[in-house]
Image (cartoon, grey):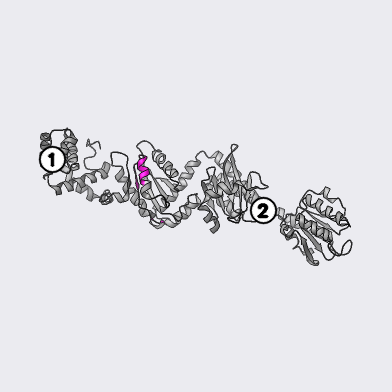
Amino acid sequence: MALSVAAALQLEVFSRTEVRVYAGEENLDRTIRWVHPVEIPDIARFLTGGELLLTAGLGVGRTPGEQRRYVQEVSAANAAALVVELGGRAFTTMPSALVDEARQRGLPLIGLVDELPFVEVSAQVHELISDERNADLLAFERLNADFIQLLLASRSHVSFAETLAHHVGSPVVLEDTDHQVVAYAGGTADTDLLMKNWGLHARMAHRTGAPSEHSRSTVVQSHEEPGCTRRMIVLRGEAWGWIHVFNGRAALSGAQAYALDRAADTIAIALLGDRESGARASHRQSSLINRLLLGDITGEQFVDRALKVGRDLRDRPLVVAVVCKEPGDDHSARAVLEPVLKSMKLPAVLADTGDQVLAVVGLTNQVSGQQLTEQLDTQGARAGVSRSGPAEHLVDAARQARTAASVAVTREKPTTLHFDRLGVLRLLVALADGPELHRYVDVELGPLLRHDATETNALLPTLEAYLAADGNKTRAAETLFIQRRTLYYRIERLNALLGRSVDDPEVRGGLSLALRALDLMGPHRPGAATEGRSW
């Protein structure tokens, strides 16, 4: 940590006399780089900035004009402060011209009532500067070690953000060039609130921000939001994104600024060496969802952790969408789901669960779960969408979405189904993995399925058409493109095989339910291994 003028005035040597600040109180946080006892009028030309000047006043000048010029010159040379003895060698009171000019320039002007041995002042200040520099060196070494360890361990962006937040003691946000939050660590109530409308800060606040002394950085100080220092991450000569440190009104210290630079550099190195950074980000989201489904974390904890990976699901109705992959195309589900979420501006955490992609989606007052369902259906997704609800119901929502998706996958055309549209199918899906549904299908359709598995002329399509026509023989014959006489013959065959009359509405109801169950059972349905059905 750099030594400030205010900290230097707390040294033991200054306690031996009365110390008064005449001007520049607002700049007592200036860093002292060195101490110089001076008694010559043209000292300014020897200064390089950051000096604490100690003088008995012999070189300050006697006239107001000389005194003003002296202050102007040392201020222009970026001196940290001017300390004047008022013990009688030159002055017993602080000259008003010095005070007035120092106030105009913002130069800290300090008066000492009694004489002090300047050699002791120099010794104590230099010793403290040395201690601070040693502390900074140790801090720099720890920083290097921490970030290099993260780099060698191939840790995630979240780990880099958490380590930086620890070292600077402030919240940290990592975003890409699209202003999508990649990681968030060390949050406070103020920055949590800011995250709700991150785009406004990212796109607007730094547009007018002042450059800091650190390259590729801007600093924003605003009464409306916490002060922020932003540092660009450069990859192959182009901006990859930015790190934001919300350090408030105080400037970043040397070690803190170094930590920000090291974080930016090591993230860039990690990106250069990480060809699977997208896969890593996807894996972090998948792990988060898996922990939720396994009961390792609650829905509320899931939402908190989602914020750390840049997905703000707080204070939103949540739904789960499950999109089924097309056979042989492992990327088809994401290719449909991600553009829909982006176009609707809905934050989501996604996980690849094998044959499906599961997304926990945050809705808005303008977008409902039904609208998401319709949009996915428009894009040709085979998917299911749950009811919307609070975070504590997320596990139930995942079960609902999977139920709806398991029905959607049985449809001939790609369809997205909302859970509320399933009706009695909810019960069938719940029974699909158990023996009861298998027994029910075998009782209702077993003879017919065994017939179709061994005979050339299958009768199951006829039963389906007849049930779809609700027993209307004319419509069923038209659907099958056969004569009514042929249909009558097939119905007689069906009645004989099933041992019941398909003209009975109750029989048709049971058979319709069995057919739906047969679809849900997929490859485990009776006769599936040898059956020639193409649906």
Magenta highlight range: 373-390
Q: Quadrant of the C terminus?
A: top left
Q: Residues within 10 Å of mark 1 (few under 14, many from 20)?
A: many
**387 inside magenta stretch:** yes
For disc 1, the marked residue is 494
Asked if residue 213 can be seen in this view, the reply is yes
x then y, percent, for residue 220: 62, 51
Q: N-terminal of the two: label 1 or label 2?
A: 2
Which numbered disc covers residue 377? none
Asked if residue 443 can be seen in this view, the reply is no
For disc 2, the marked residue is 253
Q: Amino acid at mark 1?
A: Leu
In terms of depth relative to the viewer, which is nearer, 88 or 394? 88
Q: Is residue 138 left or right of residue 342?
A: right
Q: Amino acid at mark 2?
A: Ser
x then y, percent, for residue 158: 53, 49
Q: Quadrant of residue 241?
A: top right
x then y, percent, for residue 109: 79, 59
Q: How many numbered dots are placed on residues in this image? A: 2
Secondary element under disc 2, as helix, strand or loop, is loop
Q: Residues within 10 Å of mark 2 (few under 14, many from 20)?
A: some
Q: Quadrant of the N terminus?
A: bottom right
Q: Are marks 1 and 2 in contact (CB under 8 Å)?
A: no
CA gap, disc 1 and disc 2: 86 Å
